[in-house]
Image (cartoon, grey):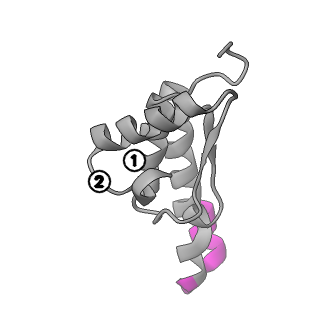
């Protein structure tokens, strides 16, 4: 993700659009290297610029490990994060079956 997902949304979209023009295939944004708090903006920017979605791991669950009840945190906060990200992808993501 350009700029590790940090910065102004419009600047991130511009950087992702540059990446999109260089790719000849569907692509997704990875959560690796992007702070969990920045990841929703990163996903939105990437999808607005042509990404088909996201692959998220630690951005969803990492902070749950530091809680008193990781299972509860996974079932609540991690699920809320995933639902928010799915909404962003549904709204802005390019179908991977679209012709490029």
The local secondary structure at tag 2 comes to loop
- Identify the residue at image location x=58%, y=61%: 60
Magenta span: predominant SS is helix
Q: What segment is highlighted magenta in the picture?
A: 66-75
The mark closer to the camera, 1 or 2, is 2
Q: Residues within 10 Å of mark 2 (few under 14, many from 20)?
A: few
- In three-dimensional space, the C-alpha distance between marks 1 and 2, rounded to whole angstroms, equals 9 Å
For the residue pair 64 and 75, the one nearer the viewer reads as: 64
The local secondary structure at tag 1 comes to helix
The number of numbered discs placed on residues in the rendered structure image is 2
- Identify the residue at image location x=65%, y=36%: 27
Q: Position of residue 63 (x, y in %)?
A: 53, 75
- Identify the residue at image location x=58%, y=73%: 62
Q: Residue furthest right?
A: 97
Identify the mark at residue 41; answer none if there is no mark.
1
The vertical placement of 71 against 76, above or below, is: below
Indicate which disc, 1 or 2, sits on the residue closer to the N terminus. 2
Can residue 51 be spotted in the picture? Answer: no
Q: Residue furthest top?
A: 99
Q: Quadrant of residue 94?
A: top right
Please say whether residue 68 is one of the residues in the magenta stretch.
yes
Q: Position of residue 24 (x, y in %)?
A: 67, 27
**Label 1–label 2 contact, CB within 8 A:** no
Q: Position of residue 77 (x, y in %)?
A: 52, 62
The vertical placement of 52 against 69, above or below, is: above
Please indicate whether residue 12 sits to the left or right of residue 57 in the image. Answer: left
Identify the mark at residue 54; answer none if there is no mark.
none
Q: Quadrant of residue 74?
A: bottom right
> Which residue position is annotated with label 2?
7
Q: Position of residue 100 (x, y in %)?
A: 65, 16
Please say whether residue 63 is one of the residues in the magenta stretch.
no
């Amino acid at each position: 993700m350009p700029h590790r997902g940090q910065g102004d949304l419009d600047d991130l979209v511009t950087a992702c659009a540059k990446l999109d023009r260089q790719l000849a295939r569907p692509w997704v944004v990875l959560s690796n290297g992007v702070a969990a708090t920045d990841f929703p903006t990163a996903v939105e920017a990437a999808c607005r610029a042509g990404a088909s979605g996201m692959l998220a791991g630690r951005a969803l669950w990492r902070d749950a490990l530091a809680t008193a009840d990781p299972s509860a945190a996974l079932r609540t906060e991690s699920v809320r994060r995933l639902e928010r990200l799915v909404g962003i992808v549904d709204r802005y993501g390019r179908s991977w079956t679209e012709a490029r």
